[in-house]
Image (cartoon, rainbow, N blue to C red):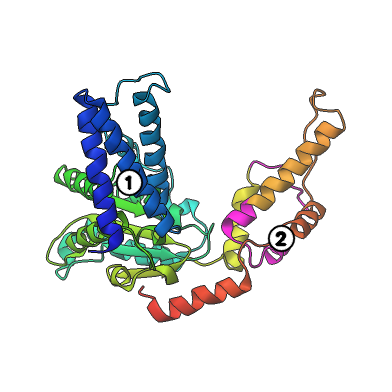
Amino acid sequence: MTASYELEELASKYANEAIRFDRQGLKGTALAKYQRAVEILLKLCSLYPSASQNKVYLRLIEQYEHRINQLQGLETYVEPAKKAKETEFEDLDQLVLREKPNVKWKDIAGLEDAKRAITESIIYPVQRPDLFPLGWPRGILLFGPPGCGKTLLAAAVATEIDANFYCIDSASIMSKWLGESEKNVAYFFKKAKQALEKGRPSIIFMDEIDSLVGIRRDEVGGEVRTRNQFLKEMDNVVDKTKKLHIYVIGATNKPWALDEAFIRRFQKRILVPVPDYYTRLEMIKIFSKGLNISKKLDFDEVASMAEGYSGSDIRDIFQSIQIKIVRELFENNNVNANLKLRTITMDDFKVVFKERKPSVSKDMLRYYEKWHGAFKAL
């Protein structure tokens, strides 16, 4: 057991005792226990300054110090929140999208390799599980530059198979209660299994998964337990002897930061790259809908100018142009004159492309290609 693990356990012990004595009316004893818990949490933060769990510790310290001030008569007394732990999963339930995400395959430009791999791994097995005697992949990792469609892919496949869609991240997993983070992990998988019993497949989408299961030099107890719990739940889901329609889709911009123990549990590892020429052309046509675009605009030239830009970069280009056109209207004091916005021309694109550069560097793209060459699994 590591020192951080022991310290967190000790802080949890003092905090729980403080809350219990507080509710019993033993304020002096509760005060001492709260103070001891704060001391240990501060020590944890100083020993492991880069630990992601520190945000949780700092919130706890603030809560405990607030209660200490109340017990010392420095602040107005407020009844302790007795229902906090009873309703600990209510916020998590908000992450379950009970309605299908409003995204379909046709809404996603390009990414044909990724679409095909996901279709083979999820859609076909849901439609005809009898055709897969050896089972099918249930762990899928989507990696690549930010803003290229990883979240859209996960949402679209949930729509295609009419699945419960759980969109979570490390911030929602790491609990404000010491020792509860691993329970949060187990809770999502439990909810997915309950949905399965009612005949609905489930997709657990974990955004920025590297922040939860990435390689760490210094880990505190809560992080270790949470990672181990996730590993356990993943093993249950990807077990080839079980015909489960529960899928874990992880998304990351930093695949090289993932622990290798988790990499192998994602049977499909799919690069979601910056859009190629034809994908950019399709995106430009999609984003042009509803805008007052000049008929003389050369879409091919715009697609060429957008080389190296991510999907979200291209969307931002269109947004910036539209803002520029609206600004002109306001600056000319024509906002109340019922005048329409002027036509968007090639000159507008040239100006904005000079002002906005790609969000992903060529050096970073080489990192993705290198990792893809070492770990790809389509």
Residue 127 in the image, given as x and y percentages of width and height? 23, 56
The residue indicated by pointer 1 is: 165
The residue indicated by pointer 2 is: 302
Q: Is residue 264 above or below residue 175?
A: below
* Tags 1 and 2 touching, CB below 8 Å: no
Q: Residue furthest left?
A: 241
Left or right of 102 in this view: 137: left
Left or right of 175 in this view: 362: right
Residue 252 in the image, given as x and y percentages of width and height? 44, 62
The residues colored magenta run 290-315
Left or right of 184 in this view: 171: right
Q: Mark 2 belongs to which amino acid? A: Val
Front-lying residue, 221 or 105? 221
Q: Is residue 204 above or below residue 16?
A: below
What crowding class fits label 1: few (fewer than 14 Cα within 10 Å), some (14-19), or many (20 or more)? many
Quadrant location of residue 373?
bottom left
Secondary element at tag 2:
helix
